[in-house]
Image: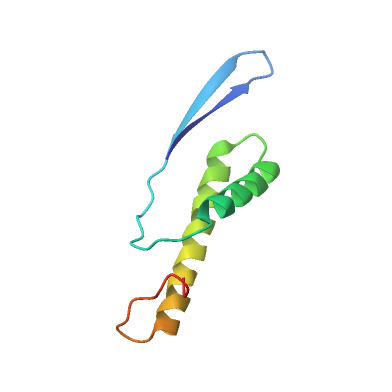
Amino acid sequence: MPGSQRTQTPDGTVMMQSIHMEMCKVDTVFIGTGDLFTAVLLAWMHKHLNSLKVACENTVLAMHHVLQQTIKYAKAKAGEGLKPSPVQL
């Protein structure tokens, strides 16, 4: 996930910070993850106004946790050895 943030130092110098993050791919289809990602990113950006990097890192961590918990719950609902249905996810 590439990104960048432009900041200005007190002396007026403009600096560009490049951000690159790697994420694990989950072999499942989810609906609404973009909405969740945006909401969580906005919340972290509000808390860390000058650090897109920190906001992105915390957002990815939160997304990973939510998706892993969702997969765990869906697998339990599907039953042992069965693949969860889209409804269970």
Relative image position of residue 38 (x, y in whole percent): 59, 47
Q: Quadrant of residue 75?
A: bottom left
Report the quarter where the N terminus lies.
Answer: top left
What's the colour scheme?
rainbow
Q: Determine the residue positioned at 38% across, 86% down.
A: 79
Measured along the vertical axis of the image, is residue 5 above or below residue 78? above
Q: Nearer the viewer, residue 65 or 15?
A: 65
Outermost residue, bottom side: 80
Relative image position of residue 87 (x, y in whole percent): 47, 73
Q: Quadrant of residue 51?
A: top right
Q: Nearer the viewer, residue 11 or 58?
A: 58
Q: Quadrant of residue 72?
A: bottom left
Relative image position of residue 54 (x, y in whole percent): 56, 43
Outermost residue, left side: 81
Q: Determine the residue positioned at 45% across, 61% down.
A: 30
Q: Nearer the viewer, residue 75 or 51?
A: 75
Relative image position of residue 77 (x, y in whole percent): 45, 83
Outermost residue, top side: 12
Q: Determine the residue positioned at 70% across, 43% down.
A: 46
Measured along the vertical axis of the image, is residue 46 above or below residue 70? above
Q: Determine the residue positioned at 58% across, 51% down.
A: 35
Total number of numbered labels?
0
Is residue 36 left or right of 43 when viewed as pictured?
left
